[in-house]
Image (cartoon, rainbow, N blue to C red):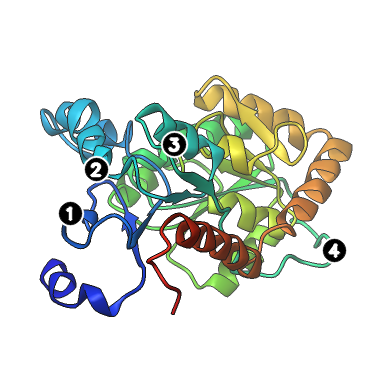
Amino acid sequence: AKKYLKAYKHHYDLIIDEINTRPFFVPNFVGQKQVVSLIHQLAREFWFYETKFPINYIGYHYLERKWLSKYKNITTVTVSNSTKIDLEEIGFKKLFIVPPGLNVTPVSNLKEKEASPTVVFIGRLKNAKLPHHALQAFSDIKREIHDAKMWVIGDGYLRKELESSNIKDVTFFGHISNEKKYELLSRAHIILVPAVREGWGLIVTEANAMGTPAIGYDVHGLRDSIRHDETGITVKEKLPEAMAQQAISLLRDSNRLFKYSTNALEFSKQFSWDRTVNLFQEVVNNHKETNPDVIAS
Protein backbone atom coordinates (compact mmCIF):
# COMPACT_ATOMS: atom_id res chain seq x y z
CA ALA A 1 0.00 0.00 0.00
CA LYS A 2 2.85 2.35 0.89
CA LYS A 3 4.59 1.74 -2.43
CA TYR A 4 1.31 2.17 -4.33
CA LEU A 5 0.44 5.47 -2.64
CA LYS A 6 3.90 6.87 -3.25
CA ALA A 7 3.44 6.20 -6.96
CA TYR A 8 -0.24 7.18 -7.33
CA LYS A 9 -0.96 9.69 -4.56
CA HIS A 10 -1.67 12.43 -7.12
CA HIS A 11 -4.64 10.40 -8.41
CA TYR A 12 -6.47 10.96 -5.13
CA ASP A 13 -7.96 14.06 -3.56
CA LEU A 14 -8.31 12.60 -0.08
CA ILE A 15 -7.04 9.53 1.75
CA ILE A 16 -8.77 8.18 4.88
CA ASP A 17 -6.05 6.73 7.11
CA GLU A 18 -7.87 4.31 9.43
CA ILE A 19 -5.80 3.58 12.53
CA ASN A 20 -6.09 0.47 14.68
CA THR A 21 -3.18 0.65 17.17
CA ARG A 22 -0.24 0.74 14.71
CA PRO A 23 -0.84 3.37 12.00
CA PHE A 24 0.03 3.20 8.30
CA PHE A 25 1.83 6.59 8.61
CA VAL A 26 0.26 7.76 5.34
CA PRO A 27 1.11 11.46 6.03
CA ASN A 28 4.81 10.58 5.88
CA PHE A 29 4.64 9.82 2.18
CA VAL A 30 1.69 11.84 0.83
CA GLY A 31 1.78 14.94 3.06
CA GLN A 32 -0.75 16.09 5.64
CA LYS A 33 -3.17 18.00 3.43
CA GLN A 34 -4.43 14.89 1.65
CA VAL A 35 -5.18 12.93 4.82
CA VAL A 36 -8.05 12.57 7.29
CA SER A 37 -7.38 10.01 10.03
CA LEU A 38 -10.06 7.77 11.53
CA ILE A 39 -9.47 6.41 15.05
CA HIS A 40 -12.18 4.40 16.81
CA GLN A 41 -10.26 3.91 20.03
CA LEU A 42 -6.83 3.72 21.61
CA ALA A 43 -5.41 0.37 22.67
CA ARG A 44 -4.21 1.54 26.11
CA GLU A 45 -5.16 -1.23 28.60
CA PHE A 46 -5.49 -3.75 25.74
CA TRP A 47 -1.69 -4.00 25.71
CA PHE A 48 -1.78 -5.73 29.10
CA TYR A 49 -4.58 -8.12 28.15
CA GLU A 50 -3.46 -9.13 24.66
CA THR A 51 0.38 -8.88 24.61
CA LYS A 52 3.13 -10.21 26.83
CA PHE A 53 5.91 -8.57 28.80
CA PRO A 54 7.87 -6.49 27.83
CA ILE A 55 5.82 -5.55 24.73
CA ASN A 56 2.81 -4.63 26.90
CA TYR A 57 4.77 -2.06 28.91
CA ILE A 58 6.56 -0.67 25.86
CA GLY A 59 3.29 -0.40 23.93
CA TYR A 60 1.33 1.21 26.76
CA HIS A 61 3.97 3.68 27.94
CA TYR A 62 5.76 4.51 24.69
CA LEU A 63 4.78 2.99 21.32
CA GLU A 64 1.14 4.06 21.00
CA ARG A 65 1.79 7.65 22.07
CA LYS A 66 4.86 7.84 19.79
CA TRP A 67 2.98 6.47 16.78
CA LEU A 68 -0.04 8.73 17.21
CA SER A 69 2.10 11.85 17.73
CA LYS A 70 2.59 11.89 13.95
CA TYR A 71 -1.14 12.64 13.55
CA LYS A 72 -1.81 15.30 16.18
CA ASN A 73 -2.04 18.14 13.61
CA ILE A 74 -4.13 16.16 11.12
CA THR A 75 -7.92 16.34 10.82
CA THR A 76 -9.10 13.33 12.82
CA VAL A 77 -12.48 11.62 13.12
CA THR A 78 -13.44 9.47 16.08
CA VAL A 79 -16.68 7.84 17.16
CA SER A 80 -17.08 8.95 20.78
CA ASN A 81 -16.31 11.67 23.27
CA SER A 82 -14.28 9.11 25.22
CA THR A 83 -11.76 8.67 22.41
CA LYS A 84 -11.81 12.41 21.72
CA ILE A 85 -10.67 13.01 25.31
CA ASP A 86 -7.93 10.37 24.93
CA LEU A 87 -6.63 12.04 21.78
CA GLU A 88 -6.77 15.54 23.25
CA GLU A 89 -4.60 14.32 26.12
CA ILE A 90 -1.83 13.43 23.68
CA GLY A 91 -2.06 16.69 21.77
CA PHE A 92 -4.55 16.20 18.91
CA LYS A 93 -5.85 19.56 17.66
CA LYS A 94 -8.46 18.94 14.90
CA LEU A 95 -10.95 16.44 16.29
CA PHE A 96 -14.46 15.63 15.11
CA ILE A 97 -16.94 13.11 16.53
CA VAL A 98 -18.95 11.08 14.03
CA PRO A 99 -21.04 8.42 15.82
CA PRO A 100 -21.18 4.96 14.21
CA GLY A 101 -23.93 3.87 11.89
CA LEU A 102 -26.28 0.98 12.56
CA ASN A 103 -26.59 -2.12 10.37
CA VAL A 104 -30.06 -3.06 11.56
CA THR A 105 -33.38 -1.21 11.55
CA PRO A 106 -34.67 -0.75 15.11
CA VAL A 107 -37.81 -2.75 15.83
CA SER A 108 -41.04 -0.80 15.67
CA ASN A 109 -42.21 -2.10 19.07
CA LEU A 110 -40.70 -4.13 21.88
CA LYS A 111 -40.75 -7.84 21.09
CA GLU A 112 -41.92 -10.51 23.50
CA LYS A 113 -39.04 -11.54 25.74
CA GLU A 114 -38.11 -15.04 26.94
CA ALA A 115 -40.36 -16.54 29.61
CA SER A 116 -37.41 -16.83 32.02
CA PRO A 117 -34.95 -13.98 32.77
CA THR A 118 -32.31 -14.10 30.03
CA VAL A 119 -28.99 -12.30 29.78
CA VAL A 120 -26.74 -12.29 26.73
CA PHE A 121 -23.05 -11.65 26.05
CA ILE A 122 -21.86 -10.91 22.52
CA GLY A 123 -18.26 -10.43 21.44
CA ARG A 124 -14.93 -12.00 20.68
CA LEU A 125 -14.07 -14.50 23.39
CA LYS A 126 -10.70 -12.98 24.22
CA ASN A 127 -9.15 -11.48 27.35
CA ALA A 128 -9.78 -7.79 26.57
CA LYS A 129 -13.54 -8.39 26.16
CA LEU A 130 -13.71 -9.94 29.67
CA PRO A 131 -16.20 -12.72 28.79
CA HIS A 132 -15.18 -14.54 31.99
CA HIS A 133 -16.52 -11.53 33.95
CA ALA A 134 -19.88 -11.97 32.23
CA LEU A 135 -19.95 -15.67 33.16
CA GLN A 136 -18.96 -14.95 36.76
CA ALA A 137 -21.68 -12.30 36.94
CA PHE A 138 -24.24 -14.76 35.59
CA SER A 139 -23.17 -17.35 38.17
CA ASP A 140 -24.10 -14.82 40.88
CA ILE A 141 -27.35 -13.95 39.09
CA LYS A 142 -28.24 -17.65 38.90
CA ARG A 143 -27.87 -18.08 42.66
CA GLU A 144 -30.47 -15.36 43.23
CA ILE A 145 -32.76 -15.92 40.23
CA HIS A 146 -32.94 -19.67 39.82
CA ASP A 147 -34.69 -19.79 36.44
CA ALA A 148 -32.27 -17.31 34.79
CA LYS A 149 -30.33 -18.37 31.70
CA MET A 150 -27.50 -16.95 29.62
CA TRP A 151 -26.61 -16.90 25.93
CA VAL A 152 -22.99 -16.41 24.84
CA ILE A 153 -22.60 -15.36 21.21
CA GLY A 154 -19.19 -15.19 19.59
CA ASP A 155 -16.01 -17.21 19.22
CA GLY A 156 -12.36 -16.87 20.15
CA TYR A 157 -9.37 -18.46 21.84
CA LEU A 158 -11.07 -18.48 25.28
CA ARG A 159 -14.10 -20.48 24.20
CA LYS A 160 -12.97 -23.94 25.39
CA GLU A 161 -11.85 -22.54 28.73
CA LEU A 162 -15.14 -20.70 29.21
CA GLU A 163 -17.22 -23.73 28.25
CA SER A 164 -15.31 -25.84 30.77
CA SER A 165 -16.67 -23.66 33.59
CA ASN A 166 -19.87 -25.74 33.34
CA ILE A 167 -22.14 -23.05 34.73
CA LYS A 168 -25.70 -24.30 34.51
CA ASP A 169 -28.09 -22.87 31.86
CA VAL A 170 -25.39 -21.18 29.75
CA THR A 171 -25.61 -21.78 26.00
CA PHE A 172 -22.62 -21.06 23.74
CA PHE A 173 -23.77 -20.25 20.21
CA GLY A 174 -20.39 -19.47 18.66
CA HIS A 175 -20.41 -17.43 15.46
CA ILE A 176 -23.94 -17.00 14.11
CA SER A 177 -25.67 -15.09 11.32
CA ASN A 178 -26.75 -11.49 11.86
CA GLU A 179 -30.37 -12.58 11.49
CA LYS A 180 -29.99 -15.07 14.35
CA LYS A 181 -28.04 -12.57 16.44
CA TYR A 182 -30.77 -9.94 16.24
CA GLU A 183 -33.46 -12.53 16.95
CA LEU A 184 -31.68 -13.58 20.16
CA LEU A 185 -31.03 -9.96 21.15
CA SER A 186 -34.73 -9.14 20.79
CA ARG A 187 -35.66 -12.03 23.11
CA ALA A 188 -33.04 -11.37 25.81
CA HIS A 189 -33.90 -9.14 28.76
CA ILE A 190 -30.47 -7.50 29.17
CA ILE A 191 -27.02 -7.60 27.58
CA LEU A 192 -23.91 -7.74 29.79
CA VAL A 193 -20.94 -5.74 28.51
CA PRO A 194 -17.92 -6.11 30.77
CA ALA A 195 -15.14 -4.47 28.74
CA VAL A 196 -11.69 -3.06 29.35
CA ARG A 197 -12.58 -0.19 27.02
CA GLU A 198 -14.45 0.39 23.76
CA GLY A 199 -14.38 2.96 21.02
CA TRP A 200 -18.16 3.12 21.28
CA GLY A 201 -19.60 -0.31 21.95
CA LEU A 202 -21.66 -0.96 18.84
CA ILE A 203 -23.16 -4.13 20.28
CA VAL A 204 -24.86 -1.93 22.88
CA THR A 205 -26.62 0.08 20.17
CA GLU A 206 -27.53 -3.08 18.26
CA ALA A 207 -29.04 -4.55 21.42
CA ASN A 208 -30.88 -1.28 22.06
CA ALA A 209 -32.30 -1.46 18.53
CA MET A 210 -33.87 -4.78 19.52
CA GLY A 211 -35.30 -3.24 22.72
CA THR A 212 -32.67 -4.70 25.04
CA PRO A 213 -30.86 -2.47 27.56
CA ALA A 214 -27.20 -2.93 28.52
CA ILE A 215 -25.35 -3.26 31.79
CA GLY A 216 -21.70 -2.43 31.19
CA TYR A 217 -18.61 -1.34 33.04
CA ASP A 218 -18.10 2.40 33.38
CA VAL A 219 -15.24 2.58 30.87
CA HIS A 220 -14.30 4.57 27.76
CA GLY A 221 -16.84 4.08 24.99
CA LEU A 222 -19.52 2.44 27.10
CA ARG A 223 -19.97 5.78 28.90
CA ASP A 224 -21.08 7.07 25.49
CA SER A 225 -23.22 4.20 24.21
CA ILE A 226 -24.98 3.55 27.55
CA ARG A 227 -26.94 6.39 29.11
CA HIS A 228 -26.73 5.52 32.78
CA ASP A 229 -30.09 5.03 34.50
CA GLU A 230 -31.88 5.82 31.25
CA THR A 231 -31.04 3.25 28.54
CA GLY A 232 -29.07 0.94 30.82
CA ILE A 233 -26.57 0.92 33.66
CA THR A 234 -22.85 1.67 33.83
CA VAL A 235 -21.15 -0.12 36.72
CA LYS A 236 -18.45 1.91 38.46
CA GLU A 237 -16.90 -1.07 40.27
CA LYS A 238 -15.45 -3.11 37.41
CA LEU A 239 -16.19 -6.39 39.13
CA PRO A 240 -18.45 -9.31 38.12
CA GLU A 241 -20.24 -9.24 41.48
CA ALA A 242 -21.07 -5.54 41.04
CA MET A 243 -22.40 -6.22 37.54
CA ALA A 244 -24.45 -9.14 38.87
CA GLN A 245 -25.94 -7.01 41.64
CA GLN A 246 -27.13 -4.42 39.11
CA ALA A 247 -28.52 -7.12 36.82
CA ILE A 248 -30.42 -8.82 39.65
CA SER A 249 -31.93 -5.51 40.74
CA LEU A 250 -33.05 -4.70 37.18
CA LEU A 251 -34.41 -8.17 36.40
CA ARG A 252 -36.51 -8.06 39.57
CA ASP A 253 -37.99 -4.65 38.75
CA SER A 254 -40.22 -5.17 35.71
CA ASN A 255 -41.30 -1.52 35.53
CA ARG A 256 -37.73 -0.21 35.49
CA LEU A 257 -36.69 -2.90 33.00
CA PHE A 258 -39.55 -1.90 30.68
CA LYS A 259 -38.58 1.77 30.98
CA TYR A 260 -34.94 1.06 30.13
CA SER A 261 -35.97 -1.18 27.23
CA THR A 262 -38.26 1.51 25.80
CA ASN A 263 -35.65 4.25 26.25
CA ALA A 264 -32.93 2.07 24.73
CA LEU A 265 -35.05 1.42 21.64
CA GLU A 266 -35.77 5.13 21.18
CA PHE A 267 -32.09 6.02 21.65
CA SER A 268 -31.04 3.54 18.96
CA LYS A 269 -33.24 5.29 16.40
CA GLN A 270 -30.80 8.22 16.37
CA PHE A 271 -28.20 6.08 14.61
CA SER A 272 -28.06 5.29 10.90
CA TRP A 273 -25.46 5.11 8.18
CA ASP A 274 -27.17 8.04 6.41
CA ARG A 275 -26.55 10.22 9.46
CA THR A 276 -22.97 8.98 9.74
CA VAL A 277 -22.32 9.72 6.06
CA ASN A 278 -23.73 13.24 6.37
CA LEU A 279 -21.63 14.02 9.45
CA PHE A 280 -18.51 12.58 7.84
CA GLN A 281 -19.15 14.69 4.75
CA GLU A 282 -19.23 17.79 6.98
CA VAL A 283 -15.77 16.87 8.28
CA VAL A 284 -14.48 16.44 4.73
CA ASN A 285 -15.94 19.83 3.76
CA ASN A 286 -14.30 21.43 6.80
CA HIS A 287 -11.01 19.79 5.82
CA LYS A 288 -11.31 21.18 2.29
CA GLU A 289 -11.87 24.69 3.59
CA THR A 290 -8.81 24.36 5.81
CA ASN A 291 -6.79 22.94 2.91
CA PRO A 292 -8.18 24.63 -0.22
CA ASP A 293 -5.91 22.69 -2.58
CA VAL A 294 -7.73 19.48 -1.66
CA ILE A 295 -10.56 19.31 -4.20
CA ALA A 296 -13.51 16.96 -3.83
CA SER A 297 -13.92 14.33 -6.52
Amino acid carrying label 1: it is: Asn
Residue of label 3: 197
Disc 1 target residue = 28
In-image side of 30 versus 102 (left or right): left
Mark 1 residue crowding within 10 angstroms, few (<14) / some (14–19) / many (20+): few
Question: Which residue is found at the position 19% from the left and 29% from the top?
Answer: 62
Between 247 and 148, the one lying in front of the other is: 247
CB contact under 8 Å: marks 4 and 2: no
Disc ID at residue 109? 4
Q: Residue furthest right?
A: 255
Residue at the extreme top of the image, as rendered: 237
Badge 4 element:
loop
Q: Residue at x 45, y 43 (%)?
A: 94
Front residue of 179 and 166 = 179
Position of residue 223 in the picture relative to residue 176 (left or right): right
Q: CA distance from mark 4 to mark 3?
A: 31 Å
Mark toward the viewer: 2 or 3: 2
Dot 4 crowding, Cα within 10 Å, few <14, some 14–19, many 20+ = few
Label 4 vs 1, first from the N-terminus: 1
| Above/below status of 54 relative to 138 | above
